């Protein structure tokens, strides 16, 4: 279910609305002058846990060229020498 609510109401009680989205999965259509302008809803991006990260890391194959790639990337970040310096 999606609830329609004014953007002014949401602005006044943003923390409450964010908590309802986060904990209850509620969705809201925000209106301005009685016209829909935005939707406030749970994100589709899932933030994983450290355990998720470790599980992915353990199952990822090693890349023997990774250190070389890092070295190349880091060397490109060095500033160009100053041609005016003596």
Image (cartoon, helix red, strand yellow):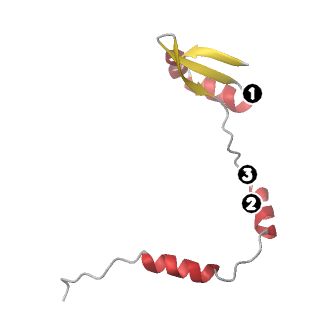
- From this view, report whether residue 60 is shown above or below residue 38: below
Looking at the picture, how far across and down is residue 46, in whole percent?
71, 45
State the residue at coordinates (50%, 76%). Answer: 73
Query: Position of 27 compared to 73: left or right?
Result: right
State the residue at coordinates (73%, 31%). Answer: 23
The answer to which of marks 3 and 1 sits earlier in the sequence is 1
Residue 79, quarter of picture: bottom left
The answer to which of marks 3 and 2 sits earlier in the sequence is 3
Q: Residue furthest bottom?
A: 86
Quadrant for the C terminus in the image: bottom left
Label 1: few (<14), some (14–19) or many (≥20) C-alpha neighbours in 10 Å: few
The answer to which of marks 1 and 2 sits earlier in the sequence is 1
Location of mark 3 (residue): 48
Q: Secondary structure at mark 1?
A: helix
Location of mark 1 (residue): 24
Mark 3 and mark 1 residues within 8 Å of each other at the beta carbon: no
Q: Secondary structure at mark 3?
A: loop
Mark 3 and mark 2 residues within 8 Å of each other at the beta carbon: yes
Residue 21, quarter of picture: top right
Looking at the rendered structure, which numbered label has been put on residue 53?
2
- Label 1, label 2: how far apart the Cα atoms are: 26 Å
């Amino acid at each position: 279910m999606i609830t329609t609510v004014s953007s002014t109401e949401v602005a006044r009680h943003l923390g409450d609305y964010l908590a309802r989205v986060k904990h209850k999965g509620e969705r809201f259509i925000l209106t301005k002058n009685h016209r829909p302008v935005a939707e406030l809803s749970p994100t589709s991006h899932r933030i994983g846990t450290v355990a998720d990260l470790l599980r992915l890391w353990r199952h990822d194959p090693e890349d023997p060229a990774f250190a070389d790639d890092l070295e190349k990337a880091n060397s490109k970040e060095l500033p160009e020498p100053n041609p005016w310096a003596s």
